[in-house]
Structure formats: structure tokens, C-alpha cells
Amino acid sequence: MELSERRPSLRRLDYHYIAMQAGFWAMFAAIVAYQTALLLERGFSNSEAGLMTAVRCLAGIVFQPLLGGFADRHPRIPLKYIVGLSLLISVAAGAWYWLSPGMGLWETTLVWVVIGGLEVSSYPLMDAMAVQFINEGMPIRYSLGRGIGSLAYAVVCVVLGFQAGRLGMESTLLTHLALVVLEILLVVTYPAYRGKGGQAGEEGPKPQSALSLLRSNPCFTLMLVGVFLGLTGIMPLSNFLVNIVNSRGGTDSDLGIALFLMGASELPTAFFFQKLLRRLGSGKLLLMSMVFGTLKGVLLLCTFNCLGVLAVQPIQVLGYGLFTPASVYFVNESVPAADRVRGQTVMMVASNGLGGMMGGVLAGWTLDLGGVNLMLAACIASGCLGVLFCLAALRLSRGKRNQLV
């Protein structure tokens, strides 16, 4: 049977993937956007809240390469089943977290290991579910899906902000559980990829280890270092937004509005991303996202009230709004076809994994040491270093192209 005969319709792939993106970012907002606020309400300190953010990200660092490597070594197992099982285990951990509001530090750590390692880490495999079809010539609108996901994130944030004000912060956990169950249904009903990787008797290049991939591709590795440092400075601006809002005189409802504006500002990126990609390329777009993400920290440092914090959020359109689609295309263009699933997981490890982990540690420590302004200054310094490494990666890549010419 020819591949074209086995392909599901483009319309189904496209709209179903957009729905899956929306579902992921909705459940992500319900658990991660309010993680710090919930931990502080449960009596943890800023440093402990930062530690839990680091634990969540560290779990992703460990689990993402394992899941990606397993998927690369077992191409006959549809990615949707790996993702679905991961989310199912996370539901159990989330239910325990909701039912035990008085749990201590060690139990809370275990919950965030599972959520960070299996729920949040499922995202690169969801990306790969679409990229598999894109590489076979199916023009799935990935950037639009990411934009709709940002809108879902924004809507859930503002709804949960009002929900927390009316029913308490703990109620957000029940909403999170419902959204994860919905996402499981969306994932397991997505069409399974039946391309060349699933044909019997066909040999192809073997996937490399993560270390071999980094050693053989210095441009990719330099960009990963830049992304890691950049996200170390950028992620606290979202994960510790509650501290920023409170320091400028805001409330829980103001936090929901700020999160809404932050997420909604990423939606327009979906409509001009492809034009920017054709004109600038994925590498320059990654650099641009690091520059504007760092600039957001500068502008937040200059704010004096909650209105100023709200006014800064739309810069997200050229900051983190660009990062996710640009990083997916950058990996797809920069690594061999056999390593693309692993490449996506390595990118996620460097960014939301290591970057989020170090950002959480940095934010928690600086908040307790000197408050929000010190945290913002440290974030700006890390972001500037990230920009320099991204520039170095682009220069090395340009030099290699000139040598080939």
C-alpha cells in the first residue's frame, strides 16, 4: 500500500493537532502558571518554591531524553501511546496532590518529579507527532497550533485567576485534572504515523546518542547553550510573575489578567511566523526571541505599579511567543532525520528543562536575598549572556556556509 493511501486527511491532522496544542497549553497553565502561588499559599518559602520549579524542570531533563530515545529506538510504537501513558501516570500524581493539601516537602517533591518528568515533558513528543507528517509533505500549520495554544493558556490563566479568588487556589488543581483527562483523549485519538519508519525490512541511519549529536554539531550545541542561558533569565518572568505583580501592588485577580495578557500576546505570532521564517530563518528567530525575552526583564525592572507590569506583557509576541515554533524548526533543519525526535527533546531539555531549573533556583535565591528587583537584574544578566552565545552560533554557521561556497 502506498504512503498516500495510508495518510489521514490533512484537515483532520491539522485541526486535531491544533486542538491538541490548545489542550496541552490549557493543562500547562492550570498546573504550572499557578505553581508558585499555590506553593506559597501552602506555606512554602520563596526558596522552596524555586526549588520545586527546579525539581519540575530537572525531572524533564531526565525524562525527556529517555522518552525521546525510546521513541527513536522503537519507531513502530506510535508516539501517541507513549504520550498518553505518560499523561495517565501524571493524572494519578495530580490527584494525590489535590487530595493532600497538607503534604510536606518530600511528598511535594515527588509529585513535581512526576508532573515535570511525564506531563510537561510530553510536549516535544507531541511536536514530533506533527513533524513526522510535516516531513512527509503534509503542511500542518504548526505555528497556528502554537498560537491557539497560547490563547488557550491565556484564557485558562484569567479564568483560574477569578476561580482562585472565588473558590481558593486549591480549586485550580481539580481544573488541572479535568484538562489532563481531556488532553489524553485528544492525544490517543490523533492519527498514528505510518510512514517510512514503520515499513518492514527497510534500514536507515541509526539515531545517535545525545552526546554524539552535540559533539558532531557545534552550531547546534552553541545555540543550545545560548537558549539555556536565555531561558534561565526569561522563565522566572513567567514562573514568578506572582512575586512581580505583588511587589507592584497587584492581587491574585491582577495575576490572572497579567497571565492572560502574556499568553494572548503569543497568538499573533502564529499569523506572521511563517513570513518571518522565510525571511530570517529559524536561527535568527531564536536569537530574536532571546533578545526580546531579555528586554522584557529590563522593562519590568523599570515598572513602578501593577499597570506597568500589565503594559509590558505584550512584548511576549516577539519573545517567548517566537521561541517554541522557532526552536522546533531549528531542530528540524539542524539535525539528521534519524535524530529529530531526540533533537526536539534535547532542545526542550536545554530550554524549559535546564533553563527553567536554573531560572527557578536563581529566582528563589535572589528573591529571598534582595527581592524582586534583584531577581530581575539577575535575569537580565543571564539573558544577555544567552544572546551572546546565540550570536556566536549564528556566526559559526555563517562561517561554515561561506567555506562551502
Image (cartoon, grey):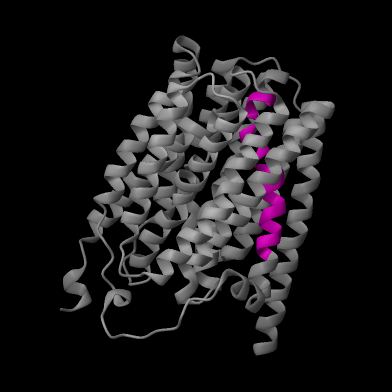
Horizontal relation, residue 92 to residue 51: left or right? left
Q: Main secondary structure of the magenta part?
A: helix
Residue 239 sits inside the magenta stretch = yes
- The residue nearer to you, when weighing 10 against 106, is 106
- The residue nearer to you, when weighing 101 against 251, is 101
Q: Is residue 334 above or below residue 231?
A: below
Residue 358 rendering spot, x and y as whole percentages:
70, 45
* Residue furthest out toward the top: 166
Which quarter of the rendered picture does the C terminus lie within?
A: bottom right
- Residue 321 visible from this viewpoint: yes
Q: Residue at x 57, y 26 (%)?
A: 258
Q: How many marks?
A: 0
Instruction: Specify the quadrant of the image occupied by residue 295.
Output: top right
- The residue nearer to you, when weighing 276 against 232, is 232
Residue 190 rendering spot, x and y as whole percentages:
26, 53
Q: Is residue 283 above or below residue 294?
A: below
Instruction: Specify the quadrant of the image occupied by residue 360.
Output: top right
Q: Residue at x 34, y 64 (%)?
A: 139
Horizontal relation, residue 117 to residue 234: left or right? left
- Residue 293 visible from this viewpoint: no
Residue 192 rendering spot, x and y as whole percentages:
26, 61
Q: Residue at x 69, y 84 (%)?
A: 402
Image: magenta residue range = 223-244
Which quarter of the rendered picture does the N terminus lie within?
A: bottom left
Q: Residue at x 52, y 71 (%)?
A: 333
Q: Is residue 27 above or below residue 121?
A: above
Residue 386 sits inside the magenta stretch = no
Residue 387 rendering spot, x and y as whole percentages:
74, 56
